[in-house]
Image: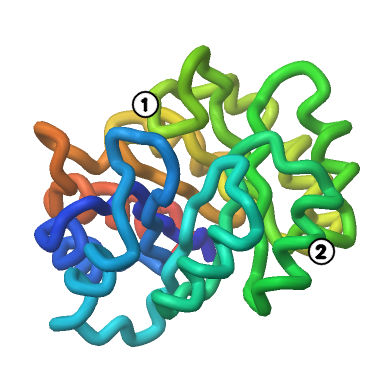
Amino acid sequence: MIRIKYCGNRSAEDVQAAIASGADYLGFIFAESRRNVSPSEVQQWLEPHKLGAKQLVGVFVNAPVRRIAAVAAELPLHVIQCHGRETPAELAAVKEAVPLSVWKAIHHGDGALAAMRQYAGIADGYVVDSRAAGAWGGTGVAFDWEAVPHYLEEAARQGVPCFIAGGITPDNIERLLVYRPDGIDISSGIETDGRKDPTKMKQIEEKIKHHGCR
């Protein structure tokens, strides 16, 4: 089964749409980004809802451990996603301070697989994203998905899931589904005019189901 993460939720309406969707994970960005949110905002948006089986992911970029721990103390997070240049030692420090799953983002490009191997035994999962100048993610740009099997193979060797991010939309997701990733991570691809679009979410989910991946 391909797991779905809808990331970059930044309003009550976004959260409502994501909770009503078929997503497994809802992502919130606590880093410099146009989708940056505060823990108090997220708390307020979540209050009227029941999560059910959905899990919350907090996305951080090169954040001090104390900052990550503080946010995790305020919100019922299930996963911490480190999306910057965090070293294996820094990831291990996060895991020691916060008793949650910790995922590492790997930016596709030369040396990405070697970087993945450095986190073996530390990272509880990976998100492979596009590399873009001046941005850590959420750019809407896809990388060459022919490389996906190599990332999946390395993650499987480590016994952890691997999500694919970057430029996934209802129009192109079928090209990615042939590789059967463990999960997909979408932000801009489910937005219309900067807001999460339930119609695009449904299109994504229907195509995944059509491929027998749900």
Q: Quadrant of residue 129?
A: top right
Q: Which of the two residues, 145 or 6, is positioned nearer the viewer here?
A: 6
Q: Residue at x 77, y 28 (%)?
A: 112
Q: Amino acid at mark 1?
A: Gly
Q: Position of residue 207 (x, y in %)?
A: 33, 49
| Numbered badge on residue 140 | 1
Q: Quadrant of residue 67?
A: bottom right
How much space separates mark 2 and mark 1, taking CA atoms? 28 Å
Report crowding for label 1: few under 14, some 14 to 19, many 20 or more residues within 10 A (C-alpha): some
Give the quarter of the figure containing the C terminus. bottom left
179 vs 10, left or right, is: right
Q: Residue at x 49, y 52 (%)?
A: 59
Q: Position of residue 14 (x, y in %)?
A: 17, 56
SS label for mark 2: loop
For label 2, the residue is: 159
Q: Position of residue 65 (x, y in %)?
A: 65, 58
Comparing marks 2 and 1, which lies closer to the viewer? 1
179 vs 152, left or right, is: left
77 vs 84, left or right, is: left
Please tell me which of labels 2 and 1 falls first in the chain.
1
Residue farthest top in this picture: 133
For residue 204, above or below residue 171 = below
Report crowding for label 2: few under 14, some 14 to 19, many 20 or more residues within 10 A (C-alpha): few
Q: Amino acid at mark 2?
A: Gly
